[in-house]
Amino acid sequence: MDFYYLPGSAPCRAVQMTAAAVGVELNLKLTNLMAGEHMKPEFLKINPQHTIPTLVEVADGFFLWESRAIQIYLVERYCTDDAARERLYPSEPRRRAIVHQRLFFDVAVLYQRFAEYYYPQIFGQKLPGDPARLRSMEQALEFLNAFLEGERFVAGGDTLTIADLSILASIATFEVAGYDLARHANVHRWYQETKAIAPAAEKNAEGAKVFGLYFTKK
């Protein structure tokens, strides 16, 4: 299957780790946003929202975007090991609900607030950091720290889920931005453990370093 992506993108890295977890090989399609490749007519036919990551099932022309939706799809469709599927994306309604909550927290709060604080500093006008947005971002990390109180993984329990993979990609991006994760003890402890055991963690680390290059150009 074709996977339109950028290595520096946290959502793209979350999908790559999920694909590795279920044993799916992605045909990587590097997509240069700066060159407007996501706005070409052929890409807009695939994804009218012109976003990455975007997944294409070449055999039957099924298209899907939004990284968390892709993560769920990959596990449900391609994870043939029942035990592994249950670990990554639990079927029990309450366990699954917590996984969903953490995924939605990542997209709507954690990474969103990272972007609101850091993106104006590294893209466009390269503005100085906004103290109010910094506080908002730190509050998101405090929420995550609270989720992890007494827990090994972000959705609770002793098994890594797709929520961990999504948030791992986000937190790796905080790290390359130079944010001191040690200020949030539970987050720091979880990050150190999870990046050591996550499938394709090396791709996440390498991609995060690519994103980190934006900070050297400020």
Image (spheres, helix red, strand yellow):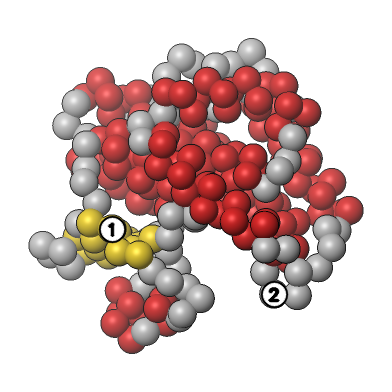
- Residue drawn at (81%, 68%), measured in percent from left and top? 127
How far apart in space, not on screen, are marks 1 and 2 (Cα)?
28 Å
Q: In the rendered view, would you say 27 is above or below 78? A: below
Say which amino acid is labelled 1: Leu
Report the disc number at residue 124. Answer: 2
Tell whether 176 sits left or right of 20.
right
Q: Residue furthest front?
A: 216
Position above or below: 205 against 152: below
The location of residue 164, given as percent across then percent down, is 49, 32
Q: Residue at x 67, y 48 (%)?
A: 177
Q: In terms of secondary structure, where does tag 1 sit?
A: strand
* Kind of residue indicated by mark 2: Gly
Q: Secondary structure at mark 2?
A: loop
Residue 180 at x, y percent in the picture = 74, 35
Point out the image quarter for the C terminus: bottom right
Instruction: Please give the name of the residue rendered at 30% of the width and 47% of the height, measured from the top-left corner.
Output: 73
Indicate the position of residue 71 as horizontal and vertical percent values. Answer: 36, 45
Q: Residue at x 72, y 57 (%)?
A: 118
Which residue ends up furthest to the right in the rendered image?
131
Marks 1/2 in contact by CB < 8 Å: the verdict is no
Number of dots carrying numbers? 2
Q: Which circle's residue, 1 or 2, is located before the other in the chain?
A: 1
Residue 55 occupies which quadrant of the picture? Answer: bottom left
10 Å neighbourhood of mark 2: few (<14), some, or many (≥20)?
A: few
Q: Position of residue 17 (x, y in %)?
A: 37, 40
Judge whether residue 121 can be spotted in this image: yes
Q: Disc 1 designates what residue?
A: 28
Residue 75: name its quadrant: top left
Q: Residue 209 versus residue 170: which sits nearer the camera?
A: 209
Quarter of the image with the N terminus is: bottom left
Q: Is residue 49 visible?
A: no
